[in-house]
């Protein structure tokens, strides 16, 4: 019976190339943000005061901690500790859900106050403030989609570990999923100061 060929190096290279395209996507949005902020510096600062820095800080802590737990999950699996790996991966998923719940309440509060595209409160703001919130919803919304995708990928990995399809001898898929999750965290580390700390 022939052994199934595994190309771990090719798999990792494919993931790095994919992550590079993601960086190009967000890099373009960061450049757009920089251009608009240069054109409307005072309005961007004024609009930033309407965001909840506490919620943003909590979400930053959540994602940074989730990066740690996903690494601990990979290390646990490498050391053949399946139960511990499942625990850390489940914890990472819980952190991802907590992030989305916080973002739901944050967006909900803004929408309730009419601060959303074509909303009544946003219509009364300056063009610069409108651009700020347009970028805020677009960039944090796209990031939120990436969080959801990352959680789906990690949940798939969790099932594969449970079924012994990802093991201490075959964990590249877990490492690739971890790399994607780290990218999501890194993007937030840039989004947080750009939108919440520009006062």
Image (tube, rainbow, N blue to C red):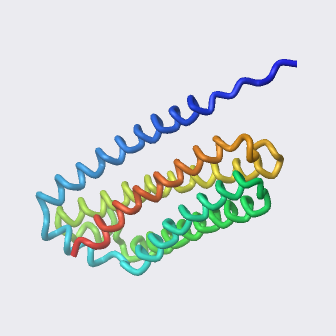
For this orientation, the residue located farthest to the top is 2
The residue furthest right is 1
What's the residue at 57%, 51% (across, down)?
A: 178
Image point (30%, 57%), residue name: 135
Q: Looking at the rendering, which quadrant does residue 92 occupy?
A: bottom right
Task: State left or right for residue 28 relative to residue 128.
Answer: right
Foreground residue, 176 or 111? Answer: 176
Q: In this view, does 117 lie above or below 9?
A: below
The image position of residue 180, as x and y in percent, is 52, 48
Total labels drawn: 0
Horizontal side of residue 64 vs 114, given as left or right: right
Of all residues shown, which one is farthest toward the front? 79
Which quadrant of the figure has residue 72? bottom right
Q: Can you say which quadrant of the picture contains the C terminus?
A: bottom left
Viewer-proximal residue among 115 and 98: 98
Residue at 20%, 72% in the rendered image: 45
Q: Position of residue 57 (x, y in %)?
A: 41, 76
Residue 196 position in % (x across, y down) = 31, 72
Locate residue 188, reporting x and y percent.
41, 61
In the current view of this chain or complex, which residue is farthest to the bottom?
A: 54
Task: Identify which residue, 167 or 57, lies in the foreground.
Answer: 167
Q: In this view, does 13 lie above or below 34?
A: above
The image quadrant where one finds the N terminus is top right
Q: Which residue is drawn at 52% across and 32% down?
A: 14
């Amino acid at each position: 019976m022939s052994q199934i060929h595994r190309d771990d190096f090719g798999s990792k290279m494919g993931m790095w190339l994919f992550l590079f395209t993601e960086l190009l996507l967000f890099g373009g949005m960061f450049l757009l943000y920089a251009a608009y902020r240069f054109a409307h510096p005072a309005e961007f600062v004024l609009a930033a005061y309407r965001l909840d820095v506490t919620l943003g800080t909590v979400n930053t802590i959540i994602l940074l901690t989730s990066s740690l737990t996903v690494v601990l999950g990979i290390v646990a699996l490498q050391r053949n500790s399946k139960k511990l790996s499942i625990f850390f991966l489940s914890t990472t998923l819980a952190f991802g859900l907590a992030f989305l719940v916080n973002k739901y309440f944050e967006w909900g509060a803004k929408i309730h106050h009419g601060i959303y595209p074509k909303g009544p409160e946003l219509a009364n703001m300056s063009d610069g403030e409108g651009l700020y919130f347009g970028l805020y919803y677009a960039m944090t919304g796209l990031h939120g989609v990436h969080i959801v995708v990352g959680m789906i990928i990690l949940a798939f990995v969790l099932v594969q570990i449970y079924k012994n399809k990802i093991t201490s001898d075959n964990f590249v898929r877990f490492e690739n999923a971890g790399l994607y999750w780290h990218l999501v965290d890194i993007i937030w580390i840039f989004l947080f100061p750009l939108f919440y700390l520009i006062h």
